[in-house]
Each structure stands twice: as structure tokens, then as C-alpha cells.
Image: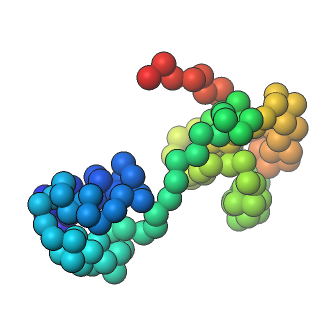
Amino acid sequence: MDITDNKIIDSLKKDSKASLTNISNIVNLSVPSVRERINKMIDNGVIRRYTIDVDYKKIGYDIDVLINITLSNSIYSEFKEFISQQKHVDFCYRISGDSCFIFKARFKEMLDVEEFIDVLKSYGHTETQFIFPSST
């Protein structure tokens, strides 16, 4: 990895659909050289996948929450299986500290949040923080 590879990654992070021509102009390399570098980063596992950035508010998901959960009875595998199947959960990390996991979820209505937390209660104690829209 060198400065040019980092510039290519920065370009792809901003726009994963950026054309090779556009990237080649940014990094001052030929299109075949850029393609070769990208393929090498894919082969080496540096670039794992291409993704999109969805504005969930525009499709009705107005409520974002962070939920910490402290599991009862060491039911880690059951919880991990459950949470991996929840389509409205954006990410889930096992963490150190008072809680076992933290995850971000999005909902359309407060009732959806309440019902989801009720389900989580069977796994342990939860603490929920609502994410306010940023001003930036």
C-alpha cells in the first residue's frame, strides 16, 4: 500500500461507482494501472466489498437508536443468531464494559421500537439511546 493506493481507496469510499477514468485522473495513472491496483487490493482483501449509502429517512425510517444489551445466562450464541436475522439492525458489536453488545437499529414508528425492546428483554437488560439528526 502506498499513497496512490490510499488515494484510490479514498475515491472509492466517496463513490463506489466512480469510473476508472475518473480515478485515473485523480491519481495520475493510466486506467489499466488503476484497474490493476484495485484488483490487487481486492485479491489481498483490502477492498472487501462495494456498498451503497441509503438515506433511510427518505423511505420512512425516521427513528435511529443505539441499544446496549447485557445478556443474562451467557446466551451469546442464541443472541448473535437472533440479532443477525433482524433486518432493521445496521450493525452489532460485542464490547467490553458493563454491556455485552451494542447495536444500531432503525424503525419507522415508536411502537416498533417498543415491541423490539420487549423482545430483547428475553435476552437480558437493555439500555436505549435515541440518535438525533445531525445538523451537518
Q: Nearer the viewer, residue 28 or 70?
A: 28
Residue drawn at point x = 34 percent, y = 80 percent = 43
Q: On the image, which quarter does residue 29 sit in?
A: bottom left
Residue drawn at point x = 51 percent, y = 23 percent = 134
Q: Nearer the viewer, residue 90 or 80?
A: 90
How far across and down, in percent of the image, does residue 75 sit? 74, 59
Residue drawn at point x = 18 percent, y = 54 percent = 26
Residue extending farthest top: 135
Residue drawn at point x = 82 percent, y = 41 percent = 116
How far across and down, in percent of the image, does residue 128 sit? 69, 31
Q: Nearer the viewer, residue 15 or 123?
A: 15
Q: Nearer the viewer, residue 93 or 106?
A: 106
Residue extending farthest front: 21
In the image, is 50 to the left or to the right of 126?
A: left
Image quadrant occupied by the N terminus: bottom left
Q: On the image, which quarter does residue 133 sit in?
A: top right
In the image, is residue 76 above or below residue 60? below
Does residue 75 appear in the picture of this structure?
A: no
The number of discs equals 0
Q: How is the image coloured?
A: rainbow
Image quadrant occupied by the C terminus: top left
How far across and down, in percent of the image, does residue 74 sit? 71, 57
Q: On the image, which quarter does residue 77 sit in?
A: bottom right
In the image, is residue 98 above or below residue 134? below
